[in-house]
Every structure is written in C-alpha cells, then in structure tokens.
Image (cartoon, coloured by chain):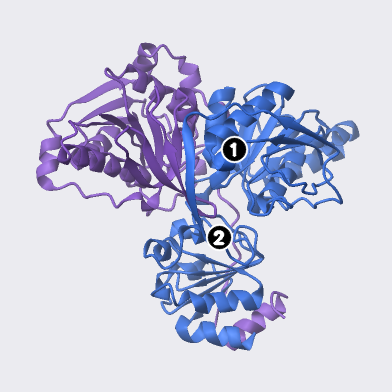
Amino acid sequence: MLSFLRPATASADLARRVARRSPATALALRRSHPQRSGSTLVVAEPTGDDSTLAPSTLSAITAASKLHSGPISLLTFSSGEANVPSSVSSVIRASADGNSSLLAETVTNALVAANEKHGYSHIVAAATKFGANYLGRAGAQLGVSPLSDVVEVLSEGMYLLHPDTFVRPLYAGNALAKVTAKDSPLKLISVRPTAFDKAEVGDGPAAETESLDVPANELTEWLLESVSKSERPDLGSAPVVISGGRGMKNGENFALLEALADKLGGAVGASRAAVDAGFVPNDLQVGQTGKVVAPDLYIAVGISGAIQHLSGMKDSKTIVAINKDGEAPIFQVADFGLKADLFDAVPELTEKL
Amino acid sequence: MKIIVPIKRVIDYAIKIRVDPSKGPRGVQLANVKMSMNPFCEIAMEEAIRIKEAAAKAKKGAAEVVAVSIGPKQCSETIRTALAMGADRGVHIETKADVRGDYVDLQPWGIAKLLKGVVEKEEGGVDLVLLGKQSIDSDCGQTGPLLAGLLNAPQATFAAKVEQDDDGSFKVERETDSGTETIKLKPADSPAVISCDLRLNTPRYPTMPNIMKAKKKPVQTISLEDMVNELGLDLDDVLSPKNEVLEVYEPPPRKEGEMVESVGELIGKLKEKGLVA
C-alpha cells in the first residue's frame, strides 16, 4: 500500500525530507492545490438579513478557496446585494416563490440547473441542517456521492498526488478519516463551518451577477416556521458559548446563563437533555446531532458530558465546566473545572466579571 | 399502506470507539463491542408502528411495516428487534463478515441505490420510507436525501412531527438551524421519504409477548451480491466506495486540564488567557 497512510503530522515531515534531497521535487511539493484549475459553486445559506452573507457561507467560501485556483461562484436565493469576499467572482441569483427556497427540492433544482449551465468541478455546501437537507438529493440527481462534514482540506505534501483528499469525522468525532473523493468530473462536499475561518468580506458585491431560472418544485410546499429570534450572536459562530444542561432544572433558570452570555458577548447553548426536557428550543442543542461549535471559550454549566455532547464542543479553544458532581465526564475535557453548585457559581461569575 | 423502514446495526451509542492500528490503517476496535440498532433507526421504526396502529384504530385499512437491513449475519438480530417492536416482516441483505458499514466500505450512495431497488421491487408500491436522520458511526446523514433524490420523491429531513392528511399528503414539522418549519409532502408517484430526528418520539421497548411473536414473522435473507443481481445494479456502484477512506486515526488529545477551587480563581485563569477583561 502507498506509504502516505500515516497520521497527518507525518506528511509535513515527509515534505521536509524530500525537500532536502531534491529541490525540484520540493518546489513541486510546495505548490499546493491552489495551483490546480477548476471552478467551484458555493451554495449560500439562508440568513435573516439579506444584506449580509451567513457566517456558515463565509466558512464555506474559505474551504472552497483551498480546492484549486479557479473561480468561485456563489448560488443564492437572496435578493439583497451583499458584499462578498474577494475570492467570489460571480453571484448566481436563483429566484423562488416565498419560502420555497428553503425546500430541499427547490435548492436541488437550482443547483442542478446552475451546474448544467456552467459545469463545475466542485460544489460546496455548509454542513448545517440546511446543507444536509439538499446535499444528498443533489448528489443523487448529479450522479455524485457527496462527501459530508469535511473538517480539513488536505492540499500539501503527499496529497498533491491525491487531490480532493479531505478529513471528516466518524463515530461522533472520536475518529477522523482521510477520504479521497473519486467521482469525476464533479465533486460534491459539505464543510463544517467551525473548521474553516470566515472569509473576509470585501468592499462590494461580486464582479458578475446572473439570474437563474429554477424549475418549479411540484413535490413539497413550505407552510410555516417557528424560530426564536435573539439579539445575541449566532450560536454556530459566537466567540463565547455558555451551555446549560439538565442541572439547570428548568427553562427559567437559563436566564442565569443569558446574563453571563450578555456579559461576555456570547451565545447560549444547551445539551440534549435540556432540550428534551423542554427547557429551551431545539436550535440551542450542541452535540453530535445538534450544532457543532468551536468558540474561543465554552462554559458548560450543569452538563455531565456525554459522548454525544462532547462531539459538538470538544474543538472549543478553552473549555470551562461547572458541575456539582466532581465525577462528571465533562471534567475530563475541561481546561478549567469548578466543582460547585451552579446556582451559586454562575451568578457569582457574572457579578465578578 | 406500506411503510419501509431501513434500520442499521451500529456500535452502541454509549461506547466511545478506539482506533486500532494493529488492524491496519483504517482499523477500529470492533471486536466484542456492543452493537445495537442505530438510535435514529429506532425512532423511525417507532414512528412507522405508530402510523400503523393509528391506521388500524381509524379503520383505514391495514398498514404493513417492513424492516430492511444491510449488514452482516448479526443484522438478523437487529431485524428481530424491529419485528418485536411491531414490524410485520424483514428483509436482510447480508454482507460478508469483513464488509464495514461505518463508511469505510458501505456508504450512503450504495445503500441508497439498494434501497431504491427494494422500494421499486415491492409489489403494490410503497407509500412511505422512514429512516433515521443519520447513523452514529458514519455520521453522514445522507441516505435519506440520496434515496429521495434517486426516487425523485418528496422529502423531509430532521422530522420532529409527522401527520398524514386524508388526501395522502404528509405534514412534517422539521428541525432547522434556527428552530422548526412545517412543510407538506404532496402525494406523488414515489413514496414520501422522511428522516427522523431525536424528538419525533420515544421508541418502545419490545415486550416479551412481542419478542416471542417476532420469532414467527417472516424475514427474507439474501446476499448482497444476489440482491444486486436481482435489482440489476452494478456491484461496484454499491460496494466500492466512491469516497475512498485512506486512513482512520484518532484526533489529537486535548491538553490535560485543571480543577479550580473558586470562581475568583477561575476568573484569574481566564484573565491570564486573555479570554476575559
């Protein structure tokens, strides 16, 4: 078998060893995938504010820029004139009636139509519930097996020989897999927003815009939604997240966490237990099957730390745990653990900050 | 009414997997590890049985629930559990013992192709396919949408509530990134395809009488190769992953943390790190 089957750190070592032996090969290895040609379509995520791109869209654009040196187009249903990162050379405006643009069938139709028009080498979605909804459907209709939840684009050293090699998590993130997408000529991937920095938005809209006719969706109809509006930062991209678990005892007590979040400019999240118990709505759930977050600071309050919860927050830069059970598994991932009653500790923390 | 419920045998949700390099670059410690029905497949099966029970109660005719599983010999136990929950019959597409279902070998693409064939082969048609939203080993969440795309079926993912109207359409409340939305799946030539999320229901434990009854329910067992032939599929398309797993490895461990004695000490530590003013 090929000798590149080693943990990720070895590939940089290998590149250095080859560089010492052969300058020509070293030059080839230093040029990474950005030298490949191609053209990518990034599918924009919906946002409440038409004048800006969603944080997850900006992360998807960063991931797209690692694939090759060719152009990036953005497919959007938004009618607003959002400024885009400089790496986005064109915006494709698809139109759909009302909230039909939120339906998997409609987005798939738009994606397929855009690809028929332009013939992309890569299509990139964000690995969110919105992205996961249409990714497979689009894959089926494009004849491409989608590669979901990419956390790393491998583009240096050995992977020059194997472009379109990515890393994605398995087993609730307790294992990572290096995977090469072999479909040709099109690859379809979704990328985990927390794994890619948000691309910086430039001074203006894209150089080119075009409109796209989308075949009507006869199969499903959008009826209504139930969303919680908040002034706080978006949970998926907030720099600070304060999460509550079963230990919070009820929904009213989450006000304690909200006060702390407001002091720190953060968002409020929750464990599955808190959501299941009806303390907070489902879109606050952090975990393997909820949102994956990776803030600078994650404070877990009254959360025991089940495998499924850890899966959603273990990439946070600094983890703090507050729990009156000193044996709680959360303390094994926490950088700082405080064994204390949260009803004393959280107000004290809020007050002293 | 006929409901197909694909179910997957996976590592039990309480187990933290370990990578096992002694088994090769993609090795994972699976020997003697407890396996169970994927939790989201359990939820899908529970929903199918509730629909069946509601149809019987409303005297709307008998609904048939078929459990389909693709995996090794031991999947037959998973199917029996589904039958004990209340499914009427099972289809076991048996893979060779060394075929891995955790993304390394079988992937959603191949599974969806098989399921499409199973759906189309069913006499009298299929009204609904209920699946779990993702399996907890491969965490792809793509089999449902892929199947819907292959069938050109109306779909709903992350279902939190499923209701069927008299005209045969399904009204589904589904979880989104910002809350929930409710959509309508119109009656179509293909079955509706719905993937199920955590809060859709709480699956029942099979009772002893039902476990006994399950032993008599029919299960068709067919090898993957034979099923692929029967459905006129390409074995390579089903079994050879288009996304080739080169290596499975453990993520780098976190640096060990420390306990603090007081809120004051915690704030001190966070200030040192520049996280708070």
Badge 2 amino acid = Met
> Horizontal placement of A144 versus A73: left or right?
left
Counting from the top left corner in percent of width and height, residue B155 is at: 45, 34
Residue B86, quarter of the rendered image: top left
Q: Residue at x 32, y 46 (%)?
A: B43
Q: Does the image show residue A297?
A: yes
Give the amino acid type for the residue marked by disc 1 in the picture. Answer: Asp
Between A245 and A154, the one lying in front of the other is A245
- Does residue B71 appear anywhere in the picture? no
User: Chain A colour?
Assistant: blue
Element at label 2: loop
Residues at discs 1 and 2 both on one chain: yes
The disc, 1 or 2, on the residue closer to the chain's N-terminal end is: 1
Q: For residue A313, which numbered disc appears in the image?
A: 2
Q: Is residue A329 left or right of residue A61?
A: left
For this view, does A347 lie left or right of residue A52? left
Disc 1 to disc 2, C-alpha distance: 37 Å
The mark lying in front, picked from 1 and 2, is: 1
Chain depicted in purple:
B
The residue that mark 1 highlights is A97
State the image coordinates of residue A274 (x, y, percent, origin top left). Answer: 42, 66
Query: In which quadrant of the rendered view does residue A79 lie?
Result: top right
Q: Is the C-beta separation of discs 1 and 2 under 8 Å? A: no
**Which residue sits at x=58%, y=31%?**
A108
Quick check: B172 above or below A163? Answer: below
Identify the residue at the far right of this view.
A23
Residue A100: image location, x then y, percent: 56, 39
